[in-house]
Structure formats: C-alpha cells, structure tokens
Image (cartoon, rainbow, N blue to C red):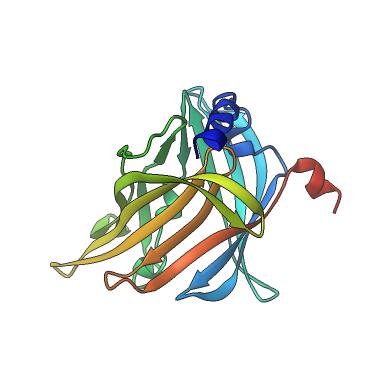
C-alpha cells in the first residue's frame, strides 16, 4: 500500500486551483444514480466556466442534469471552490428535495457552509461539517427552518476503487447526513449513514447512503469522465 500512496501524494500536491480535481472547461463527468441498489438514471455534469471571485477564490461552475431513461428531469448549477490547500464542494449538493416538496410555492432562503476537502488528508482525521440551512417563508413571514448537514465527517481509510470510469486512489470518508425541520412546532429528524470515496485528483468517485438499519438508500458512482479534448471529440 505504501508504494502506490507515495507516487500519488506527489502528483496530488502538485495541483493548483486552476484545475481543481482535474476539472477544466468542458470537462464532462457522469454518475450512475441508484436507490435501494437499483439504477435510477444518471447525473450528467459539464464544467461551464472557471474564474476568480471578488475574494480571490477560484470557482469552477458546472451544470448537472438528472437523466432518467431518455428524459432530462432536472438541471441545476453547482460550484467547486478552491482556496489555499482546500477544495470546497457546493453545500447545495446536500439539498434533499423531498424535504421542500411540502412547501411548494413558498420562498426559500439558503445559508450554505460548503463541504471542505483539504488536499493533505490523513486516515483518522476529522473533517469540518458541511451544512445547508433553509428558511421557508411566505412574503415576509417565516414558516419553518430546515437544516441538512454532513456531520461527524472522518477519513477512515485510503483505498483503490474501480468503477466503469477507471481505477482511482481514494480517501474513504464516513459521515452522518442529518435532516432536521420544525413541523408545526414538532421537531422532525432523519439520519443516514454515508460512505464516500473521494479522489484529490478526480473528486467524488462514489457515495452510498444507508438507513439507520443498514439498508441501502440513495447512492451514486462515477461511470465516465472526459477531459475537455475528449469531450469535444465526441
């Protein structure tokens, strides 16, 4: 294990924020989406643009389209931020849409704490929580607050993982995904255990949610990644 890790570390630390996780404009990366172990379509992602924001943080924006069968169901934009030695995934990726369905037609204010991935992680290391707070309101009247949080994040192993997209050197990260809301004065809480495989060179490779009873819930796995040149050759 030490052999492949030593070569991997050198290439990882040579990265710069101009191509975080190996992403450049027009890079395409596709995930197989599952629910309870069954295929439920794909997430097709494409990097749209990259630039520095007003604070000097390098921001990569990508469009994510959920496809089920031959039909596009949703299309959203997310961002990856890179600052110093840390990459941050968009906290909007923590959004659980079912939690908002009961409030269709209402207004939402989002309060993100983006999900941090230091470029020098170690087994046993605790990572900062990621969080998405949502205030639900109608006009200026607050209806409820919802919190979706990735908490108790910890690096538990370094492993090689093979998917249809290739073989990747990954950090295995475990955490609790917690959804909390106040429903008519009654607090509700839902918790999932999550195992995630993350490559500092390629980003999120695999993610599996499980119920408190250990049964598989939602998951996704990287099945294709094309760099800008490969994507344009199609």
Residue 220 is situated, as x and y percent measured from the top left of the image, at 52, 62
Left or right of 22? Residue 207 is left
Residue at horizontal 60 percent and vertical 55 percent from the top: 162
The answer to which quarter of the image holds residue 23 is: top right
Residue 103 is situated, as x and y percent measured from the top left of the image, at 34, 69
Left or right of 16? Residue 136 is left
Q: Quadrant of the C terminus?
A: bottom right
Residue 211 is situated, as x and y percent measured from the top left of the image, at 32, 70
Relative height, residue 216 to residue 121 (above, below): below
- Would residue 134 be visible to someone looking at this image? no
The one of 27 and 98 positioned closer to us in this rendering: 27
The one of 167 and 42 positioned closer to us in this rendering: 167
Furthest-left residue in this view: 185
The one of 4 and 34 positioned closer to us in this rendering: 4
Residue at horizontal 57 percent and vertical 25 percent from the top: 10
Relative height, residue 104 to residue 86 (above, below): below
């Amino acid at each position: 294990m030490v052999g492949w890790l030593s070569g991997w570390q050198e290439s990882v630390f040579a990265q710069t924020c101009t191509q975080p996780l190996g992403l450049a404009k027009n890079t395409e990366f596709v995930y197989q989406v599952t629910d309870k172990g069954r295929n439920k379509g794909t997430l097709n992602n494409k990097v749209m643009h990259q630039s520095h924001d007003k604070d000097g943080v390098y921001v990569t924006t990508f469009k994510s389209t959920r496809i089920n069968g031959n039909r596009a169901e949703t299309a959203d934009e997310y961002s990856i931020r890179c600052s110093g030695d840390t990459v941050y995934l968009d906290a909007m990726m923590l959004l659980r849409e079912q939690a908002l369905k009961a409030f269709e037609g209402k207004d939402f204010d989002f309060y993100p704490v983006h999900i941090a991935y230091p470029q020098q992680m170690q087994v046993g290391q605790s990572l900062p929580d990621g969080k998405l707070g949502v205030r639900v309101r109608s006009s200026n009247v607050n209806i409820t607050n919802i919190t979706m949080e990735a908490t108790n994040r910890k690096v538990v192993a370094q492993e090689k993982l093979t998917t249809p997209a290739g073989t990747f050197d990954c950090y295995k990260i475990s955490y609790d995904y917690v959804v909390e809301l106040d429903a008519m004065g009654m607090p509700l809480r839902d918790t999932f255990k999550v195992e995630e495989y993350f490559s500092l060179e390629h980003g999120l490779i695999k993610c599996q949610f499980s119920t408190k009873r250990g049964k598989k819930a939602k998951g996704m796995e990287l099945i294709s990644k094309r760099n800008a040149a490969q994507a344009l050759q199609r």
